[in-house]
Amino acid sequence: MDGATLLNVLAIAISVSAVLASMWFGARQVQIARQANYIPALMDLLAEFRSAELHEQYAYVCRDLNREHAPDGGLRGLPPDAKAAVYSVAYFFQTLAGLYALGVIDETAAIVMARGRIAKVWEAIEPFVEQERRFPDVDQHLLALLQAYAAVSQQFTGPSSAELIRARWHSRHSTFWQHLFGRRRR
């Protein structure tokens, strides 16, 4: 192969590499932009999670709902205050599940934030939801994202909250060499 041909092949290889890199960076930019669109929704959700009212409703749903009410009438059979608490708590966690299902937040973030709470909420409301789904005017997928999210959270074997915090702290306070050699410099 002569020099001119080799130069042309090299130029084509560089051009193809540049196009592939541009495509990769473009796809990554689209992904980042898509996730950025969800940040306001996530911030609203986190603000709601800090509210005392949501925590009071959560405590009511998990502790008192089944003791005070029979699931025979489904969700529609609950008195207004109980129904409001159930819907508020259930749809809060369903929204979190939706963000996870859409890939806005990853599994670890989605589940570690509310791992035990998700399963407790579903356990408390499941008989009411199952009864509600029996009514002909109700979508059979009522709160199905929450149901699936509860199942996933029970099977989650990822790191605990404390392990995530420690790992993040160590990654920010360690050097490349410490990671490479697994020890701290003195």
Image: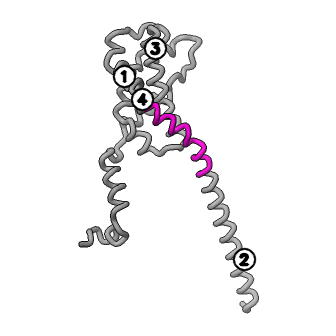
Looking at the image, residue 81 lies above or below residue 10: above
Mark 3 or mark 2, which is nearer to you? 3
Closest to the observer, 117 or 149: 117
Mark 2 or mark 1, which is nearer to you? 1
Dot 1, crowdedness within 10 Å: few (<14), some or many (≥20)? few
Sequence order check, earlier mark of 3 and 1:
1
Mark 4 or mark 2, which is nearer to you? 4
Q: CA distance from mark 1 to mark 4?
A: 9 Å
Residue drawn at 34 percent across, 70 percent down: 180
Query: How many numbered discs, if any?
Result: 4
Query: What element does badge 2 sit on?
Result: helix
- Which quadrant of the figure has residue 18? bottom right
Query: What element does badge 4 sit on?
Result: loop
On screen, residue 118 versus residue 1, left or right, reads left
Q: Quadrant of the C terminus?
A: bottom left
Amino acid at dot 3: Lys
Amino acid at dot 1: Glu
Query: What element does badge 1 sit on?
Result: helix
Dot 4, crowdedness within 10 Å: few (<14), some or many (≥20)? few
Give the residue number, with chain letter if any, for mark 3.
83
On screen, residue 24 versus residue 48, left or right, reads right
Query: What element does badge 3 sit on?
Result: helix
Give the residue number, with chain letter if any, for mark 2.
12
Mark 1 or mark 4, which is nearer to you? 4
Sequence order check, earlier mark of 3 and 2:
2
Magenta span:
32-49
Mark 3 or mark 4, which is nearer to you? 4
Q: Quadrant of the N terminus?
A: bottom right
Give the residue number, with chain letter if any, for mark 4.
51
